[in-house]
Amino acid sequence: MGYADKNIKVYLDCLAGPMPVPGGGSASALVGALGCGLLSMVAHFTLLSKGFNGYKERAQRALKKSENLRSRFTLIIDDDAKAYKALASVFKKHSRDSADLQKALKKAIIPPQRVCDYCYEAAIVALELSYTGKRSLLPDIVSAIHNLNAAFETGLININANLHFIKNRPFVRSKTKACSALQINMKQIKAKVLSVVLERMDT
């Protein structure tokens, strides 16, 4: 049974325990899933609200996207822990310059990279719902975007932590450039979501 199959108390006890897994990467995936769960809730209530019939198709698309992303985040809860264990095992057996370790480091980047990518996609859903979501649930959209941003920043930290040990400089530069661009876009969408929500709450 994976961490994602455990109840929340068991998972949190594992997270707080004296073992390195689950750790920050797994937790960031959970936080991302929580953000998507909030977006799905907003979309569901928007679909059920009589006064929002004009937004039905948009809310349905938002719901489909947020649920798809929530499923993807859930898989990473365990994928990240597996990647960390694999990397830790290679670290014990090989020098930092070994081909095996360099390969393991690149593989370890995949889960946090997916967290960042999915957070960005979910932030776009949050922006859509900030315009169309039921007004009484706007605070939940704010909670969602903050959760997604926290997961994104954690993913970014974990990517950079592994890049630090990678010797392939062109790979490092390319990955760093791509992540920096995505971070800028994420910040812009987060700011827009908050701006739209605050404007709607004041009207």
Image (cartoon, rainbow, N blue to C red):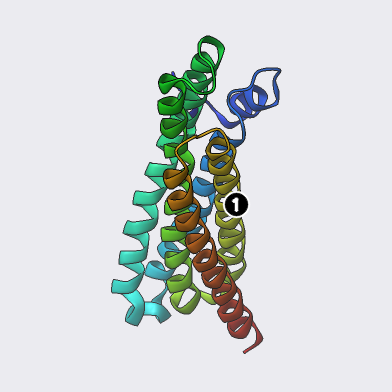
Q: Which residue lies at the image location 35% right of the left edge and 78% below the top edge?
A: 55
Q: Amino acid at mark 1?
A: Glu
Residue 104 visible in rendering: yes
- In the image, farthest residue toward the bottom: 203
Sort mark 1 into few (<14), some (14-19) or many (20+) by Cα contacts within 10 Å. some
Image location (x, y in percent) of residue 92: 56, 12
In this rendered view, identify the residue nearer to me: 140 or 184: 184
| Among the 4 quarters of the image, the one containing residue 9 | top right
Image location (x, y in percent) of residue 142: 60, 66
In this rendered view, identify the residue nearer to me: 169 or 16: 169
Note whether 190 is above or below 36 in the view shown.
Answer: below
* Residue 192 located left or right of residue 107: right
Residue 5 visible in rendering: no
Q: Secondary structure at mark 1?
A: helix
In this rendered view, identify the residue nearer to me: 119 or 135: 119
Q: Quadrant of the N terminus?
A: top left
Q: Quadrant of the C terminus?
A: bottom right
Note whether 47 is above or below 160 in the view shown.
Answer: below
Image location (x, y in percent) of residue 165: 55, 33
| Among the 4 quarters of the image, the one containing residue 72 | top left
Note whether 20 is above or below 146 in the view shown.
Answer: above
| Among the 4 quarters of the image, the one containing residue 124 | bottom left
In this rendered view, identify the residue nearer to me: 63 or 154: 154
Image location (x, y in percent) of residue 42: 48, 64
Q: Which residue is mark 1?
A: 153
Note whether 8 is above or below 63 in the view shown.
Answer: above
